[in-house]
Amino acid sequence: MNRRSFRFAFLRAASMLGALCLAVPALAQIPVTVNLNLIELFERTCSEGPPEVCPNDMYIRVNIGSNIPGNDFVRYDFPDNVGNPHPPVVPVASRVIMLNGSDGNITVDIEVWDRDDAPGSDDRMPIDGGFTALRVRYDLTAGGESEYAASGTGDNSVSIRFKISSEGNDVDGDGIPDNLEAFGIRDAGGNLIADLAAMGANPRRKDVFVEIDCMVSDGNGNGYNPLDPADHSHCPAEAAMADVVQAFANAPVPNLDGTQGVQLHLDVGRLYGAGRVVPVPGAGGAAGSYGDFGSGGTPIPEAGNTIIDWDGPTGNPATSFYSLKAAPNNFFNAGRALAFRYAIFGHQTNLRAAANDCTSGWAEDIPGNDFMITLGGVNAAGARCWTRDANGFSVGSRGEQAGTFMHELGHVLGLRHGGSDEINNKPNYLSVMNYTFQPCMVPASAAAGVPGACDYSRIGPQPGGMNDLNETSLDECAGVGGGLGFGSVNWNGDRVFPGGPALFQGATCAAPNNGSNAVADVNNDGVCITFGPNGAQDSAVVLDDNLTCPSFLCPGPGNPGSINDGPNRICNSQAAADDVQLASVGTTPGQPDLLKSFNDWGGLVFGFRDHPSFSDGVASPVKNEADPDAIRLAREYLAQVAGPDMKLTKSGPATILPGQTVTWTTELGNPGNGPALLVVLTDTAPGAAPFVQNLGTQAAGAAFTRSAQYRVPAGACPMDLVSEAQVSYRDLAAGTFTRTARAVTRVLDIVPPTLTLALSQNALWPPNHKLATLSASITVTDNCDPNPRVRLVSITSDEADNGLGDGDTANDIQGAAYGTDDRSFQLRAERSGRGTGRIYTITYEASDASGNRTTQQATVTVPQSN
């Protein structure tokens, strides 16, 4: 037989990932596809004619997994095309192996047969020395490809060269082959690179792995020290990363084992402690984790790497992300790329400007595998971009770090700023992918099971989901829908009268406010005017038109600025100087009419290794990302078109008497444009613990009333009884507010003092016409006033001062200081000789601080006779 060569191209590059979860199901349930691809096969002799006419008379029999009971040979026949080359790509054999829980090794048996014309006369050809069968061992746990070669000896022998590769079936759909989730990532030598199982991977649950490195700055050149106030770190706070892992663990994503959630595993190295790994269980049984998995948390010196990018923007110099990731820096082990995405918490990037760019982060592609978070530096005006650390460096708050990380991770998982589109700031899209909610400010709804804060959107469009918002026909009473319980939203901001309650329009509105649907720009994307080449805002903003960037940055690099149509969807502003009028005054600018929600969790793209950007240096970066002003302005606009306006009043009687019961009434109402969320009422009455009631969501137009009673003690003294109420709440844009009200009820004191009076003499004798000095003994008490006021009111005589027969003396009462607390005075021992005797009457009054008065009288007589 003539020598003949058959070459077959490699069918596919097989990848090996591995993860061994502590709760991995039986390995027999993990399928692995094993492929055998022939590289070269030729007969050493051909006895049937010259090579150019030697017929194709060979076939191959292969048993993949011959050590597994029940597996048998499969036959591959070469096409019978004498003298012509064979097709360049032909797979010889492929079989799905169910791992049996042993050592992960399988045997592969190969036979080459010579096909003869006579039935039953085919011969096995020597393939391995004098042997007619070749057996090789393939290690599924090592992964990758293994190449083998063998040659037979003697007549009709063959030489063969082939590759065996394997790929795990991804039954849980997380982009990581299941056999590799069980056995880990290994290098070409079989050494374990990443034991994903020890990190919590499970072949029957969705797992996402991210390695995180971060920049640190040595502010004074003496080496980075976290305790040095001149140094700072952009490494993420543990609480921020825990928030993200928790959000994924709580995700409404079903798994094959009946659990729910996405298991996010963050390798932060020794950032939070050497060897420390923190499991984060979710409500549905899945569990993410973060900590020291052996490779993350590498500090990247900020010096020389202050600005990082995807090496794309011309004229904006920076350090390429990929140069940090790969050689010569090697912050990321390339072998891990089979399972790990890679993120850097850096200082700044240059999406908007070559320097002083406050862009929060940047993903390389949608989907992708690399992303950065950049929460450092200052803006063009010299202000810190994001929340400062204790020493004043911009590093981002917990919510900014967690939300931006989750936002950029969302991009590499296939999400856009509108979920499936690039329509941003949609009120019916509750996700950190929405600028309005990016800093972990997603509004919560207990009614719809939306936990809020750090979250992707859980609810897609109708039916059964969020309402589509058609800006040309908005049913305000339907609100955003989705079972959120948020109620009506007065999108166009009209009122019954200025300052009055909202007027709702829509087909579902109850009388008398029903009518045609409303028109409004609910996400502020209708551009009326853009600013011209002179770089200045020359046009005035009129009526409800809206400026889209702050004045000190508008316009500017990366902030071209515009005047938009505002809630009424009509342009009211006129362009001036070189500003450009895109939509005439009185018209509606071009913008999407229909705003749809999107179920982010249900739309995640877990696979990333088959995407072009999987290769380092290949990127199609996200075109727009948020800076602090984009987030702030988006929040402010949503607060404008859908903000609540909680009114809190407290009423009660102005006065109350001891022993009576006072009733205070607390009234809470929301006449604003939209719902108040997380409403908590705290009502406090004297002598009682605060009454705290979680009222949840108070929709626009909602009202709440409660009464509280208090019995005034019978012996209560004058005081102000104060009943206070406070309500705290949030709007849809995560703005936090409080309102307070108080009612004051005065306890009245109507009990006069008690006064006792005694005189030093009650009779004067003899009537010698002389003055006698008397003193008054007074005791006064009051239930409330410790020092009641005492005053001498009067001293009177029932006889005239100088009457008949009294000796004709005047001024019979002397030394009395009326109106004062005078307790000593003189009375004349004198009476009329013609009468029955004289009676002096002395009157004292006691008064308390409340003005209550009491009087007592005492008498002194001058008898007619003894």
Image (spheres, helix red, strand yellow):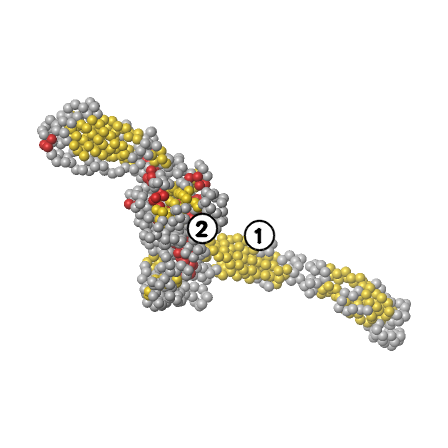
Q: Could you say where residue 502 lies in the image, as x and y percent from the top left?
A: 43, 64
Q: Is residue 711 above or below residue 144?
A: below
Viewer-closest of 687 and 120: 120
Q: Quadrant of the N terminus?
A: top left
Residue 289, quarter of picture:
top left
Q: Could you say where residue 241 lies in the image, as x and y percent from the top left?
A: 43, 45
Residue at image position (26%, 28%) is 136
Residue 793 relative to residue 222: left or right: right
Viewer-closest of 530 and 665: 530
Residue at image position (61%, 59%) is 721
Viewer-closest of 660 and 62: 62
**Residue where numbered disc 2 is placed:** 394
**Residue where numbered disc 1 is placed:** 689
Looking at the rendered structure, the secondary structure element under dot 2 is loop
Question: Which of the two discs, 2 and 1, labels the residue nearer the N terminus?
Answer: 2
Residue 579, quarter of picture:
bottom left
Q: Is residue 35 above or below residue 512?
A: above
Residue 379 relative to residue 761: left or right: left
Q: Could you say where residue 495 lies in the image, as x and y percent from the top left?
A: 42, 66
| Residue at the front extreme of this rendering | 221
Q: How many marks?
A: 2
Q: Could you say where residue 512 lies in the image, as x and y percent from the top left?
A: 41, 66
Tell me the CA gap for discs 2 and 1: 42 Å
